[in-house]
Amino acid sequence: MLAFYSNYYEVKAMRASRVPVEEQYRLTMECRKSGLSDHQLCLNNDINPGTFYNWVKRLRNNGCGDIPEKISCQLMNSLIRKL
């Protein structure tokens, strides 16, 4: 029983390394300009969607107001049909 507890405390959760603010901004703008959904960008770049939305919120709160709103899938599909 003692061995179980000693191994339990040796296990450490792995955390992803921090992404610099400049990289957060670049990825956010890339997503919004590319037409990819936020979810698809997150999948392509191994980013947790919740983390991505926190980046967007923090960037906007810190003065990066030029980040466009996400385009809904419905709007994107209607734009594609018009082409």
Image (cartoon, helix red, strand yellow):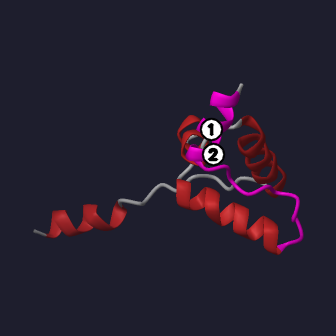
Is 31 rendered above or below residue 18?
above
Residue at horizontal 69 percent and vertical 30 percent from the top: 82
Is 46 rendered above or below residue 83?
below
Residue 36 seen in render:
no
The image position of residue 31, as x and y in percent, is 71, 42
The residue lying toward the viewer, choosing from 23 and 28, is 28
The N terminus, quarter of image:
bottom left
Residue at horizontal 87 percent and vertical 65 percent from the top: 65
For disc 2, the marked residue is 75
The amino acid marked with disc number 1 is Ser
Q: Element under label 2?
A: helix
The amino acid marked with disc number 2 is Leu
Residue at horizontal 80 percent and vertical 74 percent from the top: 61
The C terminus, quarter of image:
top right
Magenta residue check for 65: yes
48 left or right, relative to 5: right
Q: Are marks 1 and 2 in contact (CB under 8 Å)?
A: yes
7 left or right, relative to 48: left
The image position of residue 7, as x and y in percent, is 26, 61
For disc 1, the marked residue is 78
Estimate the spatial distance between the alpha carbons at disc 1 and disc 2, rounded to whole Å.
5 Å
The residue lying toward the viewer, choosing from 64 and 69, is 69
Q: Element under label 1?
A: helix
The image position of residue 39, as x and y in percent, is 54, 46
The image position of residue 68, as x and y in percent, is 79, 55
Q: Which residues are magenta?
A: 62-82
Is 52 rendered above or below residue 9?
above
Is 83 rendered above or below residue 68?
above
The disc at residue 49 is none
Q: How many marks?
A: 2
Other residues around mark 1 within 10 Å, as few (<14) / some (14–19) / many (≥20): few
Residue 23 seen in render:
yes
